[in-house]
Amino acid sequence: PIVGVIVVAAGSGTRLGAARPKAFAALAGRTILERSLDSVFGMQREAQVVVVVPADLVDEATALVTDAAGAAAEYASVVPGGSTRQQSVAFGLAALGTSVRIVLVHDAARALTPSAVFDDVVTGVAQTASGIVPGVAVTDTIKRVDEDESVVETVDRAELRAVQTPQGFPRAALDAAYAEADREHTDDAALFAAAGHTVSIIDGDALSFKITTPWDLRRAEGVLADSAV
Ligand code: C5P
């Protein structure tokens, strides 16, 4: 495949307060990871899929991924992650085949992301050769504060986007950006931009919210109950 999707699922998910690492916590009777894989394997385009999980869960994840991949299992694999998200992505990148030209990096925690967003991001990268990131307008008013929590200013929210995943990149440029990264970035787009590359935003989707807290998990379960997915 010329498209590769790295699904990072190696975080501990402490803020969720679940007994298991977040991607393996239950969401309406299945794991968060399984829900995420539904979206990934729902893509129109053929893709190599690399799922990055905690080292002790590689076997369990391999069974889930093989199941979700169905006929595409030949192009799906599971690798152990690292101590930071950035390290986990790097391990995923190392597992991609030589045919891959466009890479998407996706948080398993964004379990309800529509498949169409994945295809839109691939199209964006193919058309522009830039980094492509789904984002949504910010609805809260955002304040900049100092160390005493005193408000310094109100940031113009018209200039802001809350960004999501999957984030897509030309493969060679992303590999090079990872090789030269000298610090931790909060997302792949920041790492890619730090290497001097352009990143553009496309329309994200409200369903792509990240499941971080127990409240997020209840919200995701509410969505699934409403849509009877
Ligand atoms: O912690 P947070 O929700 O920001 O993590 C975002 C994504 O990165 C999650 O899907 C998580 O599993 C993944 N991650 C990872 N390896 C780490 C830390 C986080 O794959 N060491």
Image: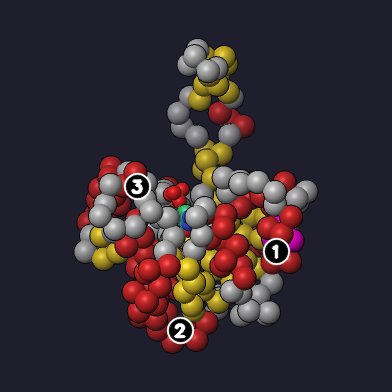
**Mark 3 or mark 2: which is in front?**
3
Q: Is residue 117 visible?
A: no
Compared with 64, 124 (above or below) is: above
Dot 1 corresponds to which residue?
Answer: 175
Which residue corresponds to the image point at 42% horizontal and 64% vertical from the top-left?
54
Which residue corresponds to the image point at 48% horizontal and 77% vertical from the top-left?
77
Residue 18 relative to residue 55: left or right: left
Compared with 140, 14 (above or below) is: below
Q: Which sits in the foreground, 163 or 139?
A: 163
Residue 73 disc label: 2
- Secondary structure beneath disc 1? helix
Q: Amino acid at mark 3?
A: Thr
> How far apart, in angstroms, are the residues tagged by discs 1 and 2?
24 Å
Magenta-drawn stretch, dominant element (helix, strand or loop): helix
Mark 1 crowd level (few <14, some 14–19, many ≥20, 10 Å Cα) = some
Q: Amino acid at mark 1?
A: Asp
Residue 211 relative to residue 143: left or right: left
| Stretch in magenta | 173-177
User: In the rendered view of the protein, which quadrant contains the C terminus?
Assistant: bottom left
Q: Amino acid at mark 2?
A: Ala
Residue 130 relative to residue 139: left or right: right
Residue 14 disc label: 3
